[in-house]
Amino acid sequence: MTHWTPDPTFYPSPREAVTAPAEKLAYVAAFDRAASRPDAIVVLDTDPDSPDYGRVVGWTDLPHLGDELHHFGWNACSSALCPTAPHPHVERRYLIVPGLRSSRIHVIDTQPDPRQPQVVKVIGPEELAKRAGYSRPHTVHCGPDGIYLSALGGADGAEGPGGVAILDHTTFEVRGAWEADRGPQFLAYDVWWHLTQDVLVTSEWGTPSMIEDGIIGELLLGRRYGHAIHFWDLAKRRHVQRVDLGDQYQMPLELRPAHDPTKSYGFVGVVISVEDLSASIWLWHRDSDAWAVTKVIDIPAEPADPADLPDLLKPFGAVPPLVTDIDLSVDDRFLYVSCWGTGELRQYDVSDPMHPVQTGSVHLGGIVRRTAHPAAPDEALAGGPQMVEVSRDGRRVYVSNSLYGAWDDQFYPDGVGAWLAKLDVDVDAGGLIPDERFFPHGDEFRGLRVHQTRLQGGDASSDSYCFP
């Protein structure tokens, strides 16, 4: 749907986006690991003045089974205000919700009742395969010229290459594969960009056959999962440069470029080093005419009694941090790092991106710690902070606890449960604390596991800006 004036949730610059009003609702992807019930988009009340604050207030079942909802995004966002955007009057209204296992793509309308979104279109896996040659859709970004959708696999749903598909802003039809020349890129995972610099960045995980059943020890120790990021010419859709982090650094996943469009840097989180089980954060940046990466944060593994560890980790006698998500505040000041294995969310001041300074830490769950939430101090938590989302003003951080069904089962074999926490941020001095009034968990999610959160009106990982 188009309007005569721009959507009021769009902002031309991150500087203006941080003044946005607080979100009233959050949308959460929830999935049934057994695939015996439909996955769902769950709606949470995030208005602290509401009697339903922190509660589930809406629920939309999907029409099929076995989707495994994972990441999702908006059909349109602030990138529509870029000077070259052909659709400046699109509306932030539809959630684009892929199924990581089914390869179905759901279009969900959040109007007229944002608490009761409705499924209005389902794109089948055959259309994604036929038109783009891809399967296993993952990251969704609202670009100025279309909806960008990364995918882990090729048309057969098992092997590569993965890549990026483009969906039409209006009809949501799959236009085709984005790449005109993919160069050496084969593995895929995340995608984001520096819009004003005509640069697109992608990261690597594995093909569907490499990740479908969880981490495969032989592949991990054989250093065969992804360990590089790729830089592309966004306008010409051509591969420009592959930057290898080193094959000991397995699985560079989430990409978080600076929101300030005049900056040429970003962060990528690496899940694990096969040499010492540590996790790390790397900064990509310009080095003369080329791109380079520099490791700026190391997070070591924690020693543990093998008796307390799942079978996968017993031989190592340690808990890996397992950095599986990161998020950068809209003002580019704070980087949040989820350590899903050790059950910790870290906050770093990255005002100087080459020299991050840790300013906060909260423990929840963890493979060994099982730290409880202060709202339920007698309830040991499984899982850990995983998907992390930051409000546009940077004052609230939301974390959910499930990573990916097969990984949940490997690292939390006694059950990962379901919980979602909100943390309040001291945006002046740094630091964050759990909000004891906001802790939906357990039966509130009706037996489903919870993954990514999207905030009504946009959040720190949904929008891109063309003006500083």
Image (cartoon, rainbow, N blue to C red):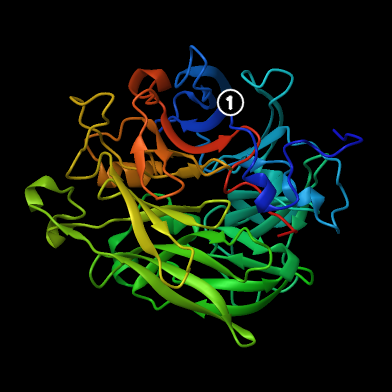
Residue at 21 percent across and 54 percent down: it is 312
- Determine if residue 167 is in view: no
For residue 47, above or below residue 273: above
Q: 432 or 211: which is nearer to us?
A: 432
Identify the residue under disc 1: 24
Assign a secondary structure to mark 1: loop
Q: Residue at x 73, y 61 (%)?
A: 178
Q: Quadrant of the N terminus?
A: top right
Q: Position of residue 317 (x, y in %)?
A: 12, 58
Coordinates of residue 142 in the picture (x, y in percent): 71, 48
Query: Left or right of 24: which side holds 358?
Result: left
Query: In the image as oriented, which residue stretches furthest toward the right?
Result: 4
Say what amino acid the circle numbered 1 marks.
Lys
Q: Which residue is painted at 38% across and 33% down in the image?
A: 421
Return the x and y of residue 224 as percentages of the image width and height: 39, 70
Q: Position of residue 80 (x, y in %)?
A: 79, 49
